[in-house]
Image: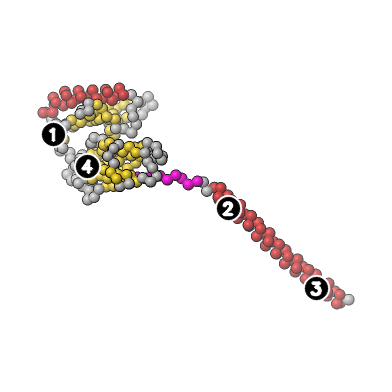
Amino acid sequence: MDLSLVSLLVFIVCSAQTAVHEVSMFYGCFDSADCQVQFHLDGDQIAYADFKEQRAVWTAALIPEQVEVLEGFYVLAVVSRDRLYKRYLHEAEQIETSPSEDKAPTVFLYPMEEAEEGKDNTLFCYISHYYPPSINVTWTINGVEVMEGRTLSNLLPEQDGTFSQLAGLSVRPQPDQVLECSVKHRALSQPAVRTWVLPGKPAGSAAPVCLVLGLVCLFLGIIIFIISAHDSLRCQLSSYWQTAYLRVAGLNQQT
């Protein structure tokens, strides 16, 4: 898939709270006659145009609050494809920006939300910075491949000429499940496998147990102290009485 023409349209957006965000439109035409139009926010893709399904696809973690945003984006994407790049494609000069060597992907697996037993969630497998842009993603639960509930975003171009993709799996995690995302790429000697399991519930607080043990130890300490003090006092009294007896006995002998 050789890139024939790529264009980037960048906007700088300032909110009322003076926060600055970069909104960009990525356009790409390929030798295969495929065209890509993507919508980026602060360097991350949040939507792209699916010309086969004739709709815009939201790829960010959160669902957009206003559908009109996507509708407007798709209309702009169609106009860009049908007018702008068909007109200027023959004047474009192809620039080779692809890496000279294959690059293996970095794979990171994480849940969309804090995982809870039996609660619907989505596992994301983020596959980043690989080249060439051809991978195979497999999901398994307890070693059995899962075919339903899978998603795969379109290619996300990176500035270094590599690509990234976001794979997803809809799950309802259970404690006895082991979920795996396996990624195959020709730069890997073996598939990159990432494993995820439902985190165990935190153990109950040990404070009550520690308190009871502390009280027991304190009680035993007091008893030992009393016994020790009693023995010491008894020894002292015994010595006192013995001394007194000797003194009295001595006096009696003298008299």
Q: Earlier in the sequence, mark 2 or mark 4?
A: 4
Q: Using the image as rendered, state which of residue 109 and residue 179 is in the foreground.
A: 179
Q: Earlier in the sequence, mark 1 or mark 3?
A: 1
User: Mark 3 — residue?
Assistant: 246
Crowding at mark 1 (Cα within 10 Å: few <14, some 14-19, many 20+) = few
User: Mark 1 — residue?
Assistant: 31
Please report the residue visible at 20 percent of the width from the left and 24 percent of the height from the top.
78
Distance CA(mark 2)–CA(mark 4): 58 Å
- The image position of residue 156, as x and y in percent, is 24, 36
Please report the residue visible at 27 percent of the width from the left and 45 percent of the height from the top.
182
Q: Is residue 121 above or below residue 25?
A: below
- The image position of residue 48, as x and y in percent, is 25, 30
Image-quadrant location for residue 247: bottom right
* Left or right: where 27 falls relative to 225: left
Q: Earlier in the sequence, mark 2 or mark 3?
A: 2
Q: Which mark is residue 213?
A: 2
Q: Using the image as rendered, state which of residue 207 and residue 20 is in the foreground.
A: 207
Image-quadrant location for residue 106: top left
User: Mark 4 — residue?
Assistant: 135
| For discs 1 and 3, the disc positioned in front in the rendered view | 1
Image-quadrant location for residue 113: top left
Distance CA(mark 4)–CA(mark 3): 103 Å
| For discs 2 and 3, the disc positioned in front in the rendered view | 2
Identify the magenta region: 195-204
| For discs 1 and 4, the disc positioned in front in the rendered view | 4
